[in-house]
Amino acid sequence: MSEDGTRELAACDPRGPTVLVVGNETTGLSRGWTEACDEVARIRMAGSASSLDAAASASTALYEAARQHTRTRGGVIATPL
């Protein structure tokens, strides 16, 4: 994830094999890691802040992945096996 990511985190599909790469708060991801990624996501933020710390970013991404893995059928939450 990067504040310069090309897609919103919620628009990404982490339901298949996925590796989450999170850079540090100061320099972000190195060029090598960025180039190795198939997709670089960004977290939509309101206000004047441009980024979150690494732990908050990773937590948000893991929450979104779990949210996308869960689906609702007839009002009952079911997780795929």
Image: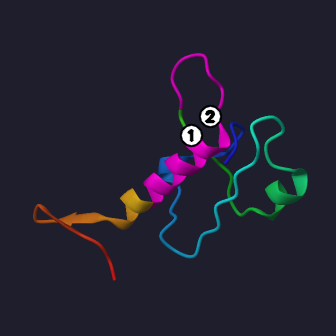
Q: Is 28 inside the magenta-drawn segment?
A: no
Which amino acid, mark 2? Leu
Question: Could you tell me if the residues under marks 1 and 2 are in contact, i.e. CB atoms within 8 Å?
Answer: yes
Which amino acid, mark 1? Ile
Residue 52 place in picture, x, y as percent: 62, 34
Residues rendered magenta in the picture = 45-65
Residue ranking furthest to the front? 55
Residue 75 figure quarter = bottom left
Residue 56 or 30: which is nearer the viewer?
A: 56
Residue on which disc 1 sits: 43
Name the N-terminal-most of marks 1 and 2. Answer: 1
Q: Secondary structure at mark 2?
A: loop
Residue on which disc 2 sits: 52
Residue that appears at 67% across and 48% down:
1
Left-right relation of 36 to 15: right
Left-right relation of 36 to 65: right
Residue 58 can be seen, yes or no: yes
Q: Secondary structure at mark 1?
A: loop
Residue 80 place in picture, x, y as percent: 32, 77
